[in-house]
Amino acid sequence: MLSKKIFIACDTNNISKVRKIIKNTSTNKLNIYYKFGLQFFYSKKGRSYLRKLNRKFFLDLKLNDIPQTCVSAINSIKDLKNCMYITAHVNGGLKMLKSIKKESLKTNKNLKVLGVTVLTSLDDKSLKQVGQNKSVKNLVLHQAKICKLAKLDGLICSAEEAKLVKDKIKNLEIICPGIRLKKKQIL
C-alpha cells in the first residue's frame, strides 16, 4: 500500500501567504507536501522562491502543447531539484505524454509525471459543448488508459472517478483535488 500524501494548495501569488501556509501546516505526523500552480509559478518571484524552497513540492502546470515545447518546458525546470511531481493534460495526446515522461527521466530522475484527466469544473454537458461525446466517467477511464500507455507515474482525477480508475487500471498513483471549505478560512 502506498503511503498517503497530503498536498496543500498554495493557490496564491503572494509569497508571504505561502510562507504562512507552510509554517501553519508543517508537521512530522503526516506526509505533507505543497502544490504550486500557474498562478504562483508565473508570478514575479514565484519561480525563484521554488528554486530555493527546501521542501518537496508538486508543480501543477498542466502542460499541454506540441511534444517539443513540452520537452523544453521540462528541461527548463531542471534547477527545481525539489519538484517531485509535474502535471500534463492527457488530452495533449500519447506522443506528448511519452515525450514529457522521457525528458523528465533525463532532467530529474525523481520527478513523477501525472496526467490531468477531466478538470473538476467540467461536467457531461460541458464536455458535449467542446465536442466530446463520452461522459466524464468514461473519458476519465479512457484517459487513465492513455496515462498507463505513456508510462506516466499517475493521474489526477476527481474522487468520484478514483475508485473506477483503481478498479480498472493498476499501478498508477491517483491524486484527487481537495475539497473547498464552505466558509473562507484564513490561515
Image: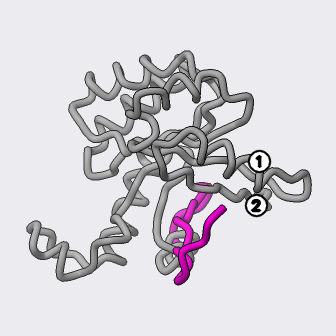
Tell me the quadrant of the picture where the N terminus can be found.
Answer: bottom right
Residue appearing at x 60%, y 32% in the figure = 83
Residue appearing at x 36%, y 29% in the figure = 99
Q: Amino acid at mark 1?
A: Lys
Find residue 4 and name its label: 2
Density class for disc 2 (Cα within 10 Å; few <14, some 14-19, many ≥20) is: few
In the displayed structure, 161 sits above or below 29; it is below
Instruction: Please say whether residue 25 is visible from this viewpoint.
Output: yes
Residue nearest the observer in this picture, 30 or 72: 30
Residue appearing at x 65%, y 22% in the figure = 52
> Is 170 included in the stretch rendered in magenta?
yes
- Horizontal side of residue 31 vs 92, given as left or right: right
In the image, residue 42 lies at what x, y percent?
38, 33
In the image, residue 34 lies at what x, y percent?
64, 47
Residue nearest the observer in this picture, 146 or 187: 187
Q: Can you identify the residue that label 1 sits on?
A: 23
Question: For the residues marked 2 and 1, what is the alpha-carbon distance in whole angstroms?
Answer: 21 Å
Q: Earlier in the sequence, mark 2 or mark 1?
A: 2
In the image, residue 155 lies at what x, y percent?
49, 55
Magenta stretch: give its range.
168-187
> In which quarter of the view is residue 185 placed?
bottom right
In the image, residue 19 lies at what x, y percent?
67, 42
Instruction: Please say whether residue 151 is visible from this viewpoint.
Output: no
- Horizontal side of residue 73 vs 64, given as left or right: right
Label 1's element? Answer: helix
> Is 44 included in the stretch rendered in magenta?
no
Residue appearing at x 49%, y 31% in the figure = 46
Q: Amino acid at mark 2?
A: Lys
Query: Main structural element of the magenta stretch: helix, strand or loop?
Result: loop
In the displayed structure, 170 sits above or below 57; it is below
- Horizontal side of residue 100 vs 106, given as left or right: left
Label 2's element? Answer: loop
